[in-house]
Amino acid sequence: MGLLSLSSICNGGNPDFKTLRTFLGEAKEHFKTVKPFVELSGNVTVAGDTHGQVHDLRRALLESGVCPSVDEEPISPMVFLGDYIDRGPQSIQTAVAALYMACEHPDRVVALAGNHERPVFDYNRPTCLPGELRAAYPEDWEDLLQDFRDVFDELPIAAIANKDTFCVHGGPPQTTQLDSLVDLPKATFTDPAQLEAVCCLWSDPASPAQDAILKKEGIRAVFNTPRQAGLVYGEEYLRDFLEANGLRHLVRGHQLLSLDGPVDHWGLGTTVFTASNYGASGNAGSTVTVGGNAHKHTVWRPEE
């Protein structure tokens, strides 16, 4: 796309205003053609939240073997689960890198929406997308913020890998059947009144202690009070969703649950988090590759 390349995005700092604005306009038109739910096949690598850490997005590509280098095209399929922006220092580069790959290689790379992309969070600090844009493009940042919002509004919600793995930022929709959601406008997934759709971006799996309480009370899921959106879902809720749609597994991001890599949920789901040393916690970055009967976890320690 024009003057951009994956190498220039990852290694060269923020694009100039004209290049960035042109790219975002082209990206918006591309994502308008993408359905809310997309399918892909092969050994699919899934990356979780990158949160403004472009070095971890780059490592996700290289460590997993998706790209031999940032100067070469992806040789296997990739899904990004969203939350490219905020909290880390390079939201602009991280978001543009994921969007660029999805636009350049639509048959191999999928960039999903996370809750931080719907809507763009307006944190009052430099380490957020609005703050970065304000600092990098002081005269034009509001126009660029709207451009990013326009692109994010068109991002798909979920990907189905190999017809058996549901990849999504948060969790299953409230409705059991995916068929009831496939033709919804993408904006539906940001409407708090549309709980069955908003759950895809905001829900969390129950902890073992929470799941034990849910089972004792005969409840499958409860409102996600800490986030004030989506659900906290238990084992039976996830199992019912997967079985109703002919699926075997769910891969999601949205939470840092372990310092050591991906976390399993009842053998039915996996949480993957890609931003290493998130919040100076010292956690490893990771990806999950799904294909066949086994999942491969790729894990790396934080860079010095």
Image: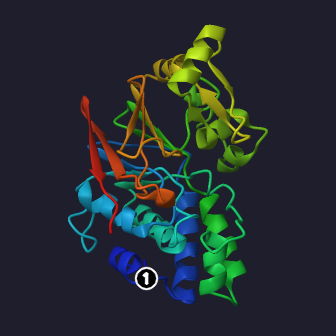
Q: Quadrant of residue 304?
A: bottom left
Q: Amino acid at mark 1?
A: Gly
Position above or below: 147 against 155:
below
Picture coordinates of residue 161, whole percent (x, y) = 37, 39
Picture coordinates of residue 192, whole percent (x, y) = 76, 42
Rendered residue at 42%/68% (across/down): 54
Q: Is residue 50 visible?
A: no
Q: Quadrant of residue 263?
A: top left
Picture coordinates of residue 10, whole percent (x, y) = 38, 75
Q: Is residue 127 left or right of residue 263?
A: right
Q: Is residue 46 left or right of residue 121?
A: left
Position above or below: 30 against 251:
below
Rendered residue at 56%/40% (across/down): 170
Picture coordinates of residue 75, whole percent (x, y) = 23, 58
Q: Secondary structure at mark 1?
A: loop
User: Mark 1 = which residue?
Assistant: 2
Task: Specify the farthest residue to the right.
Answer: 193
Q: Is residue 269 visible?
A: yes
Q: Quadrant of residue 125?
A: bottom right
Position above or below: 283 against 247:
below
Q: Is residue 221 left or right of residue 100?
A: right
On-image quarter of the N terminus: bottom left
Look at the image and name its color scheme. Answer: rainbow
Nearest the eye: 2 or 98: 98
Position above or below: 262 against 121:
above
